[in-house]
Amino acid sequence: MPLFRRCDGDLITDEPLVRRMMPYLMPRRSDSLVFFEQEIDVTALLAHLEQLNEGRPEEERLSFFGAALCGVARVMGQRPKMNRFIVGRHVYQRRKIEFSFGIKKRMTDDAPLSMMKLGFQPDDTLQTVAERLRGALSFGRCEKRSKSEREMTLALKLPPPMLRFGMWLINRLDRLNLLPKFMIEADELYTSATIANLGSVGIGAPFHHLYEWGTCSIFGAIGIIEKRERATGDGRTETRQVVTFRWTFDERAAEGLYCAKALNLFKAYLESPSILEHPPER
């Protein structure tokens, strides 16, 4: 049992024996990666967003990325084990739903990439996510640096031996649950999931690794929207719009069947997007 409590999660003590042993059998995230590919028909979602965006100004339009984030937040509210993490070989239930994602300052090769972390609620809707995302994108694309970027700028001015010692010390404090709350809140890798919308820049979704730093147990990559011919029930074919999602999970946080049911729920939300217009019934 850890001596100190964490500010960002609650210790889980009632897991089955096999689950409790996993952090000892696989002490690093790189030991416990599980990859999953998911194809989702988004034809209905895109048509629904187009209908909702009719007459809206450009800056208030609902986006496909926002719908995906809304779906993931809704799943984490209903499948809370997806929002767990491992520190110091112990499993914790995260107290918040937070997602991190990258924002290019400009669509050029040499433009910097800014990382953002944004909080969500289990009863978020397409509209509330769009409003929250709009503010984050506006800040991410401005020239002002985030708190973590300012901290990294100062850290990189240190001599390499001092920087390595500082990183070791922070990691050690984290394992002992002594890392200050303000450092956890500012770091984009202390998050429920990192979501990369690579389709927005015209490339497919890779299988991405998880970082050893921080507490992120899920990485989701979103690919481009493609047209595919799909068979119908009466023997005909029709053109559908499909997106490939590629997920990377820390197996120690939640077991496979639980994750599979969560992904099926996510797929159901994106294929029936009207559900996301309203908060879920409690």
Image (cartoon, helix red, strand yellow):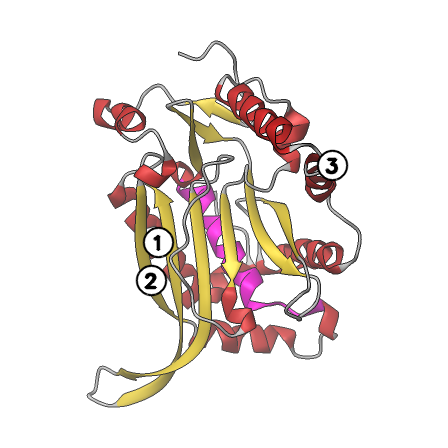
> Comparing marks 1 and 2, which lies closer to the viewer?
2
Marks 2 and 3, Cα distance to the nearest angstrom?
40 Å
Q: Which quarter of the picture shows residue 249? A: top left
Amino acid beneath label 3: Leu
Q: Which residue is mark 3?
A: 154
Q: Which quarter of the picture shows residue 131? A: bottom right
Marks 1 and 2, Cα distance to the nearest angstrom?
8 Å
Q: Which residue is mark 1?
A: 263
Q: In this view, which residue lies farthest toward the top?
A: 3
Residue 172 is tagged as none
Q: Which residue is mark 2?
A: 38
The residue depicted at 48 percent of the width and 35 percent of the height is: 215
**Disc 1, disc 2: CB below 8 Å?**
yes
The residue depicted at 40 percent of the width and 67 percent of the height is: 271
Q: Nearer the viewer, residue 245 or 23?
A: 23
Q: Secondary structure at mark 3?
A: helix
Marks 1 and 3, Cα distance to the nearest angstrom?
40 Å
Region rendered in magenta: 60-79
Q: Is residue 148 above or below residue 58?
A: above
Amino acid beneath label 1: Leu
